[in-house]
Image (cartoon, grey):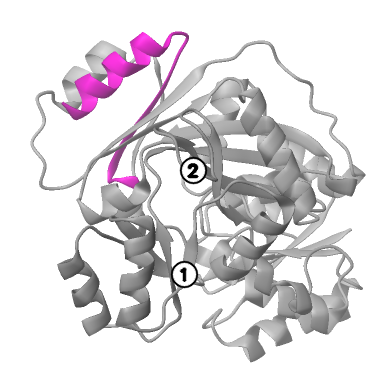
Amino acid sequence: MNYIFISPAYPVTCTHFCDRLSKLGVNVLGIGDVPYDSLNDQLKAALTEYYYVQSLEDYEQVYHAVAYFVYHYGRADWLESLNEYWLPTDARLRTDFNIPFGTRENGIGVLVRKSEMKKVFLEAGIPTARQHIVSDLASGRAFAAQVGYPVIVKPDIGVGANGAMKLKTEEDLTAFYGELPSVPYVMEEFLYGDICTYDAVIGPDCEPLFESMCTYAPVIDSVQEDEDIHFYTAPEVPPQLLELGRRTVKAFGVDRRFVHFEFIQLAKDYAGIGKTGDYAVMEVNMRPAGGHDPDMMNYAHSVDVFQIYAEMVTFGKRLFPESEDRYLCAYAARKDGHVFSHTDEEIMERYGGDLVMREEMPPIDWPSMGRYVYIARFRQKEEMERFFRFVLG
């Protein structure tokens, strides 16, 4: 089996996906804009061959790299980046090379455009916030008057919280339209509540092979307000979120992918959407969660999601066993310029036995994921809350 991996060096978790695929006998063929000598040793060992391009933005360079692999190794069975930014490139390459698994170019719009996602949610009866496609100030004012402030504006095609803003007042709205971005934007009503993700490895026929949930405060606040980051992966997925996640998978016809869907657990009642404690979908991401979220799933569920994904690719099913040994896996990250009550040494002395990871994130992730990261796991939620207060207080 030939698996072409676009950008295997970033994010860092791609190394583990490549490693597990390679150990199952897959030819992992990497294409990236990072020189080969800069790859970590585990990734080098996992790759059958690596093709360096000067820029992954240059489609012709990437096309020629795929053509080289097809010529030398035969037809490509899979092509993925597992990175939201490259999903349109992935789809175009699958179309041009007739690669059997994965979304083709004619189906990518509904997976990357928030306005197109919204249509699928509504048609499937999945609760979601009201949305308006940004056009002119008068229309924006009318929508804000209908749903109330604050409203969220974000790129119709965008990665994570990049470019997203919370407009709290009429003055914020006017200022936004005064410097209207050149790319298409959407505006949505703001739903109060925590973000709860449905993360899953999906096999053939929309069947989940692994499911998990992560809960965190809205990322837009941590970016826009420069707040420190904390969130956690839960040991179980609540039944209502499980049901909505699976419905969303079927609504989009997800087939053999790792997915990351974002929901809001409502903090108050919303007419036509749900009551306090219910869930409303925000958006779908047809790739694994970013940062160390896949690692946290492993720590919370005592599994190997990279192995589960590789088994799905290779065998179309899951072989890795379920585990009853479950935890709350907590992520706390500090940002530069903030003052904290406890030093790194004090954190290590107090929580060294609970920590499963401690590191500095790449600069590109600092706004949304923080710089200095501490990941620990606990049996009780009270213990986790004390950890958050100690690290970030």
For marks 1 and 2, the one nearer the N-term is 1
Identify the residue position indicated by label 1 in the image: 132
Q: Nearer the viewer, residue 103 or 165?
A: 165
Task: Judge from the rendering whether residue 149 lies leftward or rightward of residue 218; answer left or right.
Answer: left
Residues drawn in magenta: 369-393
Nearest to the observer: residue 191 or residue 78: 191
The part of the image, by quadrant, that contains residue 308 is top right
Q: Please state if 295 lies on the left or on the right of 245 as rendered.
A: left
Q: Nearer the viewer, mark 1 or mark 2?
A: 2
Name the image quarter holding the C terminus: top left
Q: Position of residue 32 (x, y in %)?
A: 58, 71
**How many residues crowd mark 2 within 10 Å: few (<14), some (14–19), many (20+)?**
few
Query: Residue 110, image x and y in percent?
Result: 67, 68
Q: Secondary structure at mark 1?
A: strand
| Magenta span includes 249 | no
Q: Nearer the viewer, residue 121 or 317?
A: 121
Numbered tag placed on residue 271 in the rendering? 2
| Picture residue at 77% right of the left edge, 79% below the top | 106
Q: Amino acid at mark 1?
A: His
Tell me the kind of residue under disc 2: Ala
Are dots 1 and 2 in contact, CB under 8 Å?
Answer: no
Q: Position of residue 175 (x, y in %)?
A: 19, 76
Quadrant for the N terminus, please.
Answer: bottom right
